[in-house]
Amino acid sequence: MVEVMYFAWVRERIGEPREQVDTNAATVADLVEELRAREERYAVAFSDLSALRVALDQELADFDAPLAGVREVAFFPPMTGG
Amino acid sequence: MVEVMYFAWVRERIGEPREQVDTNAATVADLVEELRAREERYAVAFSDLSALRVALDQELADFDAPLAGVREVAFFPPMTGG
Amino acid sequence: MDVRVQGDAFDVGAELSAFGQGDANVGAVVSFTGIVRDVAGGLDRMEIEHYPGMTEKAIATMVDKASARWGLADSLVIHRYGVMRPGDQIMMVATAARHRVAAFEAAEFLMDYLKSRAPFWKKEFGADGSSWVDAKDEDEDALSRWD
Amino acid sequence: MDVRVQGDAFDVGAELSAFGQGDANVGAVVSFTGIVRDVAGGLDRMEIEHYPGMTEKAIATMVDKASARWGLADSLVIHRYGVMRPGDQIMMVATAARHRVAAFEAAEFLMDYLKSRAPFWKKEFGADGSSWVDAKDEDEDALSRWD
C-alpha cells in the first residue's frame, strides 16, 4: 500500500490530491501502467510521461526507480518555483 | 595653466592634494616629465607609470593623451572601490 | 541557514537588515527578490501550490550544497505559497560570503535550483481564465552551468 | 537611477523596501552590499578617499550602460567615503529588471566596474600601521567578461 499524491494539473486531472493505492508494482513505471488502466482520468493525466516528474518519499526519482519500501509517491509537472 | 590633483599614495608622496601647474606640455607624458624633473618627491611619485592612472577633466585617459584644452589633470593609483 | 516556506508576506528590508551581521568574515551580501509580474496586463492573481514537507527538504538540500561549495557564512531562503497579486513578493534568497563572486554565484545557483527543482507550481488567473505556468527550457538549461 | 556618494552610513533594509516598487514590469530585484571585513583580525579602521565630482560622473556612466544593456527598470548605487570600521557597510548596488538573469548580470557588471573604475582608494589602519589596499589582478580580469 502506498500513498500516491498529485500536484498542479495532474491533481486537477485525477480529481483528488492523494489516495491510498494497493499495488505490487515493482517500479514507478509499473505503477503508472496500473493507474492508466483504471479509468480515463488516469489515462489522460499520465498520457505523456515526458511532461511529468515523480518523487519517492519526497525525493525526485526516475520512472524506472524501484518502489520497494517506498511509502509516498508523488506525480507532478515540471516545477515552476522562484 | 592646469589644475593637477593627486590621490591616495600619490598625494602622500607629493605632499599635497592639488596645485596649479604652469605648463605647455603637449601630452600627459610630457607633463609627467616636467614634474619628475622638479623635485625628488615628484620623481618618487612618478617613478613607475604602470602603477598610475590619469584622468583628464574627470575622465580616465592614457598617458599619451593630449593636454590641449584640459583644465584638470588627476594622478592616482589603480582604483579600489566597491 | 534559514529556510522558510510560508503563506504570509515577508519584509525584504527587515530580513536584510538582520542578515549576515556581526560576522567579521562577511564582506559581501547578495539578495534576490522575486515579484509577481503582470506580463500581459491582464493578471488578476497567481496561486502557488507546493508539496509540504518535500519543499522544505529540497530547499535545505540546495542551501547545504551552496554553503559547502561557496563557503557561505550565512544563507536565507523564503518562498511563499498561496494567492499573490501583481507587485507582491513571491520569494527571496540572501547569501553572505567573504567575497562578492562567491555571494553572487551562490545566490544564482540557489535561484536556478529553486526555479526548476523546488516543488512549487504556479497558476495564473486573469480575465481569460486560468492556466498553469509552463516550465521554461532556459530555466532547465541554466542548471547545467553548475555541473 | 539613483546614485549617491556620501560619508554617512545607509540602511540597506530601508533602501530595499522602497526599491523597484509599483512597476508591473519588475519581476526581479538583486542587491549587493559590501561590508568592511577584518581579514587578518587586526583591522582598526578603513579610510576611503574619493575624487569628488569624478566619482559621481563615473558611477552614473556605469549605471547608464547597465540600464541600456539589461533594460533595467530601476537601479541604485550608494558608495561611502571616509572612516569605516569592521562590520560597517561600505556600499550597495540594487537592480530591478523583468527577469532574474538581467538583474543578476547588471548588478555584477556594476560591482566589477565599481571595483576597478570608480575613483575610490582604500587605506587600512591596524596595529601594525597603515597601508593602501592594492588593486587585484582578478578584479581587473573580471571586467573583460563584459566586453
Image (spheres, coloured by chain):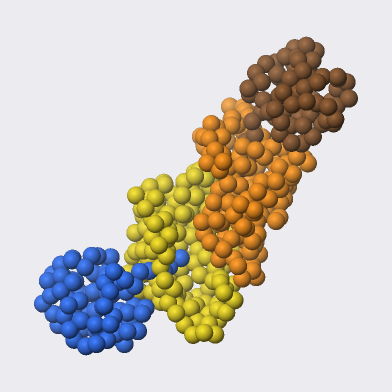
Chain colours: A blue, B brown, C yellow, D orange
The x and y percentages for residue C143 are 38, 55
Residue drawn where x is 76% and y is 15% of the image: B33
Q: Is residue C56 left or right of residue C93?
A: left
| Residue D56 figure quarter | top right
Q: Is residue C123 above or below residue D146?
A: below
| Residue B4 figure quarter | top right
Pick the front one: D82 or A53: A53
Pick the front one: B65 or A6: B65
The x and y percentages for residue C56 are 37, 67
Q: Is residue C37 above or below residue D80?
A: below
Image quarter hosting the N terminus of chain A: bottom left
Residue drawn where x is 53% and y is 82% of the image: C126
Q: How many marks?
A: 0
The x and y percentages for residue A74 are 27, 74
Pick the front one: D20 or D9: D20
Q: Is residue B28 visible?
A: yes
Q: Is residue A19 above or below residue D62?
A: below
Q: Is residue D129 left or right of residue C135?
A: right
Q: Is residue A74 above or below residue B81?
A: below
The x and y percentages for residue D9 are 68, 50
Residue drawn where x is 40% and y is 68% of the image: C135
Q: Is residue D45 visible?
A: no
Residue drawn where x is 57% and y is 41% of the image: D147
